[in-house]
Amino acid sequence: MKKSVRAIIGILLIMFIAGCSNAIENEEQRIQVQKYMGNENNYQDFKVINQNERVKQVKEILGHIVWENAKVSMVRPPDYRFGFQYKDPNIDAKAVLYELWISPNKDRVELVIDAESKYAQLDKETSAVLYEIITEEKLSDLK
């Protein structure tokens, strides 16, 4: 009898913990985007992406990236920086800052998560989609 009560309590506890973490995962988020303004470490708020579908698209793209573990040193600061924030100000979560560079050929983007020493260069198609969501401009229009 005692074993079954302990098992039930254990299962309920696990379900409660999983439910709490899922509640935070399912909370609506927005993406805060900053643009490099030409001076060393000078970024200005560029835009906020509030549309849930666009936020999900970016999360999906980032979730499918095969990141390289590498500490990179780029020749210039990132063109854009962005991170996810919960719309509910009462939720406190560790922010991950993504840094985005436009490649010299202006056909791809490169991403770095500096705090985690991660680097990735996206293929042309994924670069175009991510860039358009983040900036509302087409990567192919850059000159």
Image (cartoon, helix red, strand yellow):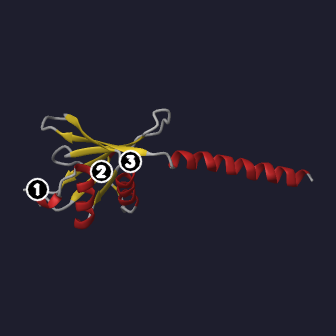
Percent of width and height locating residue 140: 14, 61
Q: Secondary structure at mark 2?
A: strand
- Kindly report which numbered mark, 1 or 2, lies closer to the viewer in this rendering: 1
Q: Are marks 2 and 3 in contact (CB under 8 Å)?
A: no
Residue identified by numbered label 2: 112
Q: Is residue 50 above or below residue 1?
A: above
Check disc 3 and give the amino acid type.
Glu
Query: Do residues under tags 1 and 2 come within 8 Å of each other at their CB atoms?
Result: no
SS assignment at label 3: helix
Q: Residue furthest right?
A: 1
**Residue 113: image x %, image y %?**
33, 48
Instruction: Examine the image and state in which quarter residue 105 appears.
Output: bottom left
Q: Tell me what residue is drawn at x 61 percent, y 45 percent.
A: 20
Q: Please give the residue where the numbered disc 3 appears in the rendered image.
A: 116
Residue at x 45%, y 33% (from the top left corner)? 89
At mark 1, the secondary structure is loop
Q: Residues within 10 Å of mark 1 (few under 14, many from 20)?
A: few
Viewer-closest of 12 and 50: 50
Q: Whole-Å distance between the Cαs marked 1 and 2?
A: 21 Å
